[in-house]
Amino acid sequence: MNGPFANPVGFLSIIRREMVRTYKIINQAIWPPIITTVLYVLVFGMALGSRIHSVGGVSYAAFLIPGLIMLQIIEQTYSECSSSLFQNRFMGAIQELLVAPLSAAEIVAAFIVSAVLRALFIAGLVLAVGALMVHTLPTNWPLFLGVTMLVAVLFGAIGFIFGLTADRYDNIAAFSTFIMTPLVFVGGVFTPMRLLPAPIQRISVINPMFSMIDALRASFTGHSDLPLPITLGVIGILAIISTAIAYRLTAIGYKLRV
């Protein structure tokens, strides 16, 4: 059997290994999203919720939940994928993938599928917290699942790229600290666009993180500040570009072969 996906056993083995890794580091991958969400809902939901009674026809706490879900999806998907690949390179375990009969497409696809499964799991955890504390659930499940998976593909691929190219763990953390986190926090996680200062509103329109949060929030409220077809198209194009870069770097063996 020839072709880019000629080894389904190896492909599934990588996915299984990545998911087992996620469940083994429960204090890093599972508890933080739950605890963080509870704290955000308690602090922001109660403090600001008493002053902001309704946002887009829902309570402020219900407005907050989709942003928190997206926040955790982005952070966990990027950090887990990048750190897993970096650790494999650092400890030399990546050589096992290189000597196995696995194509570049199978390796990249396995890591990205793992990222999607991890994102759905994390989203489910935060969604359960939201349902218990705020009594809110998506009204448009296909949109919720579609946005979640698209964003997971995008940040799984970005995490793969940084895990592959990083010389030190600081390189991975730098992207999260100086680029990803600021864009997320001005991307409408905690405040609707209309409450932001005018300069920040103009920046938010071109902020891809705002588009992702806005699209996911639309699956709960049925309302979006940006046109959904454009938002989903932008996320999809970014996901394709990032995946293509990850595949190309893997295909040429960039920082893989020593």
Image (cartoon, rainbow, N blue to C red):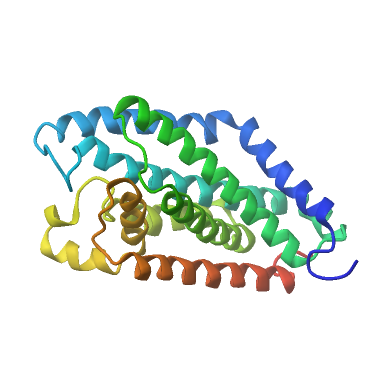
- From this view, report whether residue 105 is shown above or below residue 148: below
Q: Is residue 86 visible?
A: no
Q: Position of residue 192 (x, y in %)?
A: 19, 51
| Left/right of residue 65 with respect to residue 88 in the rendered view | left
Q: Position of residue 65 (x, y in %)?
A: 32, 39
| Left/right of residue 102 with respect to residue 40 in the rendered view | right
Q: Quadrant of residue 48?
A: top left
Name the residue rendered at 27%, 47% in the picture: 221
Q: Residue at the far left: name it.
A: 51
- Total labels drawn: 0
Which is nearer the eye, 36 or 115? Answer: 115
Which is nearer the eye, 78 or 191? Answer: 191
Which is nearer the eye, 179 or 38? Answer: 38
Q: Quadrant of residue 251?
A: bottom right
| Left/right of residue 101 with respect to residue 176 in the rendered view | right
| Left/right of residue 134 with respect to residue 253 in the rendered view | left
Q: Position of residue 171 (x, y in %)?
A: 52, 57
Q: Which quadrant of the rendered structure holds the N terminus?
A: bottom right
Q: Is residue 121 visible?
A: yes
Name the residue rendered at 38%, 59% in the picture: 179
Q: Which quadrant of the rendered structure holds the C terminus?
A: bottom right
Name the residue rendered at 31%, 59% in the picture: 210
Q: Position of residue 176 (x, y in %)?
A: 44, 53
Which is nearer the eye, 25 or 46? Answer: 46
Name the residue rendered at 19%, 37% in the picture: 59
